[in-house]
Amino acid sequence: MKFAFVHDHRGTWPVSVMCRVSGVTPAGYYAHQKRPPTRRSQRPAELVDAVRTTFADTRRVYGSPRLARALNARGVRCSENTVAKVMRAEGLSAVRRRRKRPPKSLALAAAEPPHVLGREFAATTPNAKWTSDITYLWTSAGWAYLAVVIDLFSRRVVGWAMSRTPDTELVSRAFRAAVVRRRPPGAVLAHSDRGCQYTSAEYQQWLASIEAVASFSRKGNCRDNAPTESFFATLKTDPTATASRRRRCRAGYNSGDGVSVGLAGGGPLLPGVSHPHRRSRTMSDRPAPIPPRT
C-alpha cells in the first residue's frame, strides 16, 4: 500500500500523517518502497502471461482441463481451478464446435407424428385409450425386453409380450394380445413414443387394419406417456414382482411365446399371473380386498 500522497477535497496529506494514521513508521514505509517484489507477488502476472501464450499456441481450442495439463508439461505449476479462474478473469473461452442441425423441410414438418392423446390420461370407457412402451429388465438369465399395453380406464395391463430383442414383432405381439384379450368394439387410440418399433411401416399398417388411431409422444417428452413410465417404475421396484421373477425363473415357467416370465420379469403385475392382493393406485376395477384371517 502506498502512502506517499493522498488527495481529497482538503488537499494532499504528507506521508508522516498517513503513517501515523495507519500505525506504521515512515522508515518502514520507505523500506517497503525500496524492497524488490517477491516471487509470490510476481507469480499471478507470470501465470496470466503463460495462460495467454499457451492458449494462443493451442489455437484457442483448449479449455481449463487440457490447458492446465499443457502448462504443467511446459513447467508451469498450476491446477485446473487456477487456470479456470485466470481464463474467466481474462475473458478467455475455448472455441466450441457448433452443433449442426439438419434443416426441417415443410414436407417433414407435415409428416410430423400426431400427438392425439394430448396428455388426457383419463378415460370414461374401457378400451378407448391404450398406451404402450418397451423396457428392459435384468434377470439371472440376462437382459430381456418387455412390451406392455395399458388401458387408461383401469390402468391395467391388457396385453404384453417378451423377447430377447426389442423389434417390431415384440410390440405387435403385445398389441395383438391386448386385442384378443379385450376385443374392443370400436376404434382404439393407441399411444406410444417415437421408437422405431412403433413408427415402422409394418406396425402402422397393422394398426390401420384394425382401425386403431395412432398417437405419438412429442419429441424428447417422456411425460406424454407418463402412465406407462409409471408402471415400469412400479414393475422394477415392487417387491412382489421381483420375488415372483426370481421364483418363476428358477421354476422355468413358460408363458407360451417362447420366453419365460422369469426371464422378462413380468411377475404378478401382468395379466394371467394370479396376485389378488395387490392394489393399484389408479384402478377403477380393483381386485377384492385381502380376506381376514380365520
Image: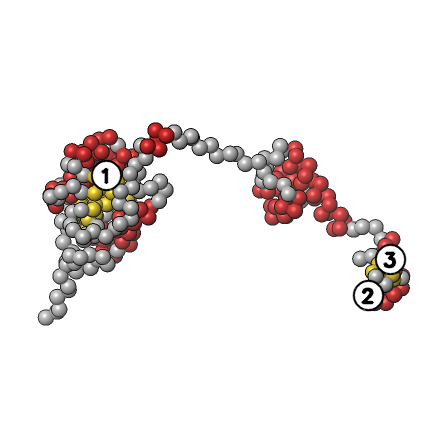
Task: Name the disc covering residue 287, or none.
Answer: none
Q: Name the residue: 58% across, 38% down.
A: 94
Seen from the viewer's position, the closer of residues 120 and 36 is 120
Please name the residue that numbered disc 2 is placed on: 22
Q: Residue visible at 62% across and 33% down? A: 58
Q: Amino acid at mark 3?
A: Ala
Look at mark 1 in the image and give the residue it sits on.
214
Image quadrant holding the N terminus, namely bottom right
Comes first in the chain, label 3 or label 2: 3
| Crowd rating for badge 3 (residues with CA inside 10 Å; few <14, some 14–19, many 20+) | some
Q: Is residue 177 visible?
A: no
How far apart are the two marked residues, 3 and 2, measured between alpha carbons? 12 Å
Name the residue at the bottom extreme: 294
In whole angstroms, how far apart are the C-alphas of marks 3 and 1? 83 Å
Query: Does the CB distance between marks 3 and 1 fall below 8 Å?
Result: no
Q: Residue at x 80, y 50 (%)?
A: 37
* Label 2 secondary element: helix
Q: Amino acid at mark 1?
A: Ala
> Would you place residue 108 above or below residue 27 in this image?
above
Percent x, y of residue 81: 60, 48
| Residue located 86% across and 63% down the image | 10
Q: Quadrant of residue 213?
A: top left
| Disc number lying in front (2 or 1) | 1
Q: Identify the residue position indicated by label 3 in the image.
A: 4
Quarter of the image containing the C terminus? bottom left
Residue 3 in the image, given as x and y percentages of width and height: 84, 59
Q: Name the image quarter holding residue 145.
A: top left
